[in-house]
Image (cartoon, rainbow, N blue to C red):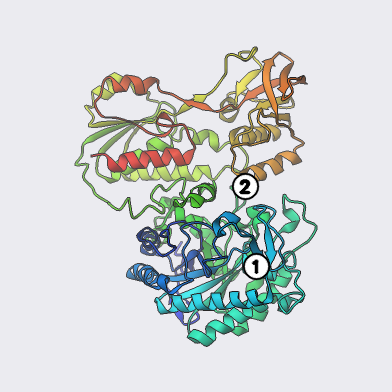
């Protein structure tokens, strides 16, 4: 495919961008501690510009350093001290012929009091977020007018810094979205009530920017065209902002000076509509952008887990959108556009929608550390991993294990021109990925496996399948180093009576197909994501499933987004959830569970599936340590974890091998 539409230029106001790929904003927590642009941040965005992205929209950028803070190390345009850093960012992106807009943002009620000095959050009507539960107060009329000036002033600073344009963040439940939505805006002054009144704050911001910097400076708006409150996991009886009204808002605001509309969906109460888990199909919300495009005469950007260039080309060629907005996909592969243009689509490292980026933002971001991508260890760390040296000089390195850690280590080492031989005992590459792709809606895992297969072949890695590594076979190769990523095995606590029974198996047994169960009553012990996904797979086989968890809640360590996504589907399957129940005995016909108060409960089931975690397989690693001088553990062999751990440990060790 030629991708003639996707790769064609387009004008956003007075600015011509080189193609139709827009990097959507994602908070990265890469700014300096004083909220100015850092070298880390410049390197992160420059990498995407170098990869060919047409327009980069940086991320949530403060317009107010008092009430408008969402997290530490968040970029700011709230003071003149921010201008030099913004100029540095503009220069970094322009060096690679890219364009960059700054996303102007205020979180409103969607922040936590700790980051704004313990004060209550502010919003149009003082309605607190059901997710953050932070106390919230209503803004005065004077505060609204002051906020308008904050946005205008921030835009002027971006203009002075040489930034190509600004995006007003009126999506995802943040402050401007809160004004637009009848769910969060109950005001009775000129900023509430009718559609036009609720949009007044944005109109005044646009007019103020135009008065300050002129009509030629590009100004765009991001909007949640549907808040999807009807699908919330919280008890909400309102519709909020719906598509029809969102279209009217766009039609109303464009004449005041908007140059493009960036269409998204969802708020914190419907977070999975804004930042989708893996179950959402590609392009599922393009119809929202299509509806807006039919109503306005400026370019419209569409988003919705777009991962494949073929799909992006299709929706543009069909006239549904003018540009595609891609965020996580460019986090996973900054060269997405370049590979597309060069006909190397099969080499794109497609985002698998695991939401590690969002999970890491919630944890790392609040600690002042950058977020991370599960499958691209360099993401937001380009400033640190800044060498592309090729100094392997043909030295032999053996990699044991063809899971994600082994494949990533082999890839990086081969890029560095080491001679790499990989041993995998099974008949296919993938390791634990070949189990992770088996539950419903986990097909995107196959993209990662395919990416590694293509890369290893391209780079000349010698792969030996169906070949367990032995001390003798490795010694014959006289390797400079041995990377060991032999993965992990399921934990089976032998202290539980009956655990060795014929009706007991592990989640790995189910996912691998070694054990198949249908039309039975099954107890899944453990409610981590593996347990829940195994329960869903069992549910598709017409089993009655009971999920048993000794902690007080289901999925105690699971990502909130992924948890609510799979749990919602499990509920539709009539799955029974049993938190605060500890497995103490297994019989041929039941499990005996102990409740918090010590009471015992007998649950009649025909099968028991253990999903109690894994422990590292260190058998070969210990032998290797005594036979070779340079043995390096990666993945679960180094520390049990998820895909992100496997990839990051492998990348780091392969990157620094001397």
Specify whether residue 631 is in view: yes
Relative placement, left or right, of 165 versus 399 is: right
**Image position, residue 197 (x, y; %):** 72, 78
Q: Residue at x 68, y 15 (%)?
A: 585
Say if 144 sits above or below 557 in the image.
below
Please identify the quarter of the rendering in which residue 555 is found: top right
Q: Position of residue 264 (x, y in %)?
A: 61, 64
- The disc label shown at residue 304, or none: none
> Label 1, on which residue?
177
Reading the chain from its start, which is encountered first: label 2 or label 1? 1
Where is residue 504 drawn, in percent x and y? Answer: 64, 18
Q: Farthest residue toward the left?
A: 393
- Which residue lies most toward the front here? 118
Label 1 crowd (10 A; few <14 / some 14-19 / many >=20): many
Quadrant of res 169: bottom right
Q: x%, y% of residue 431?
A: 46, 32
Residue 258 versus residue 27: which sits nearer the camera?
A: 27
Q: How many marks?
A: 2
Marks 2 and 1, how far apart at CA: 21 Å
Q: Residue at x 26, y 39 (%)?
A: 657
Which sits in the foreground, 419 or 591? 591
- Camera-side mark, 2 or 1: 1
Left or right of 329: which side holds 502?
right
- Residue 561 badge: 2
Quadrant the C terminus occupies: top left
Q: Nearer the viewer, residue 42 or 218?
A: 42
**Direction right: furthest residue:** 237
Residue 289 appears in view: no
Give the SS element for disc 2.
helix
Left or right: 549 as drawn, with respect to 621: right
């Amino acid at each position: 495919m030629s991708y003639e539409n996707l790769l064609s230029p387009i004008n956003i106001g007075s600015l011509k961008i080189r193609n139709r790929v827009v990097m959507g904003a994602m908070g990265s927590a890469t700014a300096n501690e004083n909220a100015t642009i850092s070298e880390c941040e410049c390197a992160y965005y420059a990498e995407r510009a170098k990869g060919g992205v047409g327009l980069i929209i940086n991320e949530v950028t403060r317009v107010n350093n008092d009430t408008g803070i969402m997290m530490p190390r968040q970029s700011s345009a709230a003071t003149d001290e921010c201008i030099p850093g913004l100029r540095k960012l503009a220069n970094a992106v322009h060096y690679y012929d890219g364009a960059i807009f700054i996303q102007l943002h205020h979180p409103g009620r969607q922040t936590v009091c700790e980051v704004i000095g313990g004060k209550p959050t502010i919003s149009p009507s003082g309605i607190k977020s059901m997710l953050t539960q932070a106390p919230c107060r209503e803004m005065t009329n004077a505060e609204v007018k002051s906020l308008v000036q904050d946005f205008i002033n921030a835009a002027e600073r971006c203009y002075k810094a040489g930034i190509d344009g600004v995006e007003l963040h009126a999506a995802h439940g943040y402050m401007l979205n809160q004004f637009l939505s009848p769910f969060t805006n109950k005001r009775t002054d000129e900023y509430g009530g009718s559609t036009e009144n609720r949009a007044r704050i944005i109109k005044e911001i646009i007019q103020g920017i135009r008065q300050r910097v002129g009509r030629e400076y590009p100004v765009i708006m991001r909007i949640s065209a549907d808040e999807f409150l009807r699908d919330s996991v919280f008890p909400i009886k309102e519709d909020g902002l719906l598509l029809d009204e969102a279209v009217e808002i766009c039609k109303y605001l464009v004449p005041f000076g908007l140059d493009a509309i960036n269409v998204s969906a969802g708020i914190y109460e419907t977070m999975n509509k804004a930042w989708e888990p893996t179950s959402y199909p590609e392009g599922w919300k393009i119809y929202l952008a299509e509806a807006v495009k039919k109503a306005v005469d400026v370019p419209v950007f569409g988003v919705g887990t777009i991962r494949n260039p073929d799909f992006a080309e299709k929706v543009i060629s069909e006239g549904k959108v003018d540009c595609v907005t891609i965020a996580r996909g460019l986090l996973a592969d900054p060269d997405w556009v370049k590979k597309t243009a060069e006909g190397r689509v099969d080499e794109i490292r497609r985002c698998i929608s695991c939401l590690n980026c969002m999970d890491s933002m919630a944890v790392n971001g609040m600690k002042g550390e950058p977020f991370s991508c599960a499958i691209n260890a360099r993401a937001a760390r380009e400033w640190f991993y800044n060498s592309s040296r090729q100094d392997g000089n043909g030295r032999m390195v053996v990699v044991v294990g063809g899971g994600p850690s082994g494949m990533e280590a082999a890839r990086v080492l081969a890029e560095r021109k080491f001679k790499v031989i990989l041993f995998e005992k099974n008949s296919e590459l993938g390791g634990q990925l070949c189990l992770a792709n088996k539950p419903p809606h986990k097909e995107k895992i196959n993209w990662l496996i395919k990416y590694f297969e293509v890369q290893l072949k391209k780079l000349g890695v010698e792969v030996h399948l169906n070949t367990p590594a032995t001390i003798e076979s490795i010694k014959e190769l006289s390797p400079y180093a041995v990377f060991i990523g032999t993965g992990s095995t399921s934990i089976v606590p032998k202290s539980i009576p009956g655990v060795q029974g014929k009706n007991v198996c592990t989640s790995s047994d189910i996912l691998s197909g070694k054990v198949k169960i249908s039309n039975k009553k099954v107890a899944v012990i453990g409610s981590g994501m593996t347990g829940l996904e195994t329960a869903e797979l069992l549910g598709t086989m017409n089993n009655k499933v009971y999920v048993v968890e000794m902690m007080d809640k289901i999925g105690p360590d699971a990502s909130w987004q992924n948890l609510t996504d799979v749990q919602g589907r499990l509920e539709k399957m009539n799955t029974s959830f049993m938190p605060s129940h500890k497995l103490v005995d297994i019989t041929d016909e039941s499990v005996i569970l102990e409740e918090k108060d010590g009471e015992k409960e007998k649950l009649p089931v025909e099968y028991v599936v253990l999903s109690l975690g894994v422990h590292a397989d260190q058998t070969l690693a210990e032998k290797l340590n005594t036979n070779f001088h340079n043995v390096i553990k990666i993945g679960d062999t180094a520390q049990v974890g998820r895909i992100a751990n496997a990839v990051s440990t492998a990348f780091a060790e392969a990157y620094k091998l001397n």
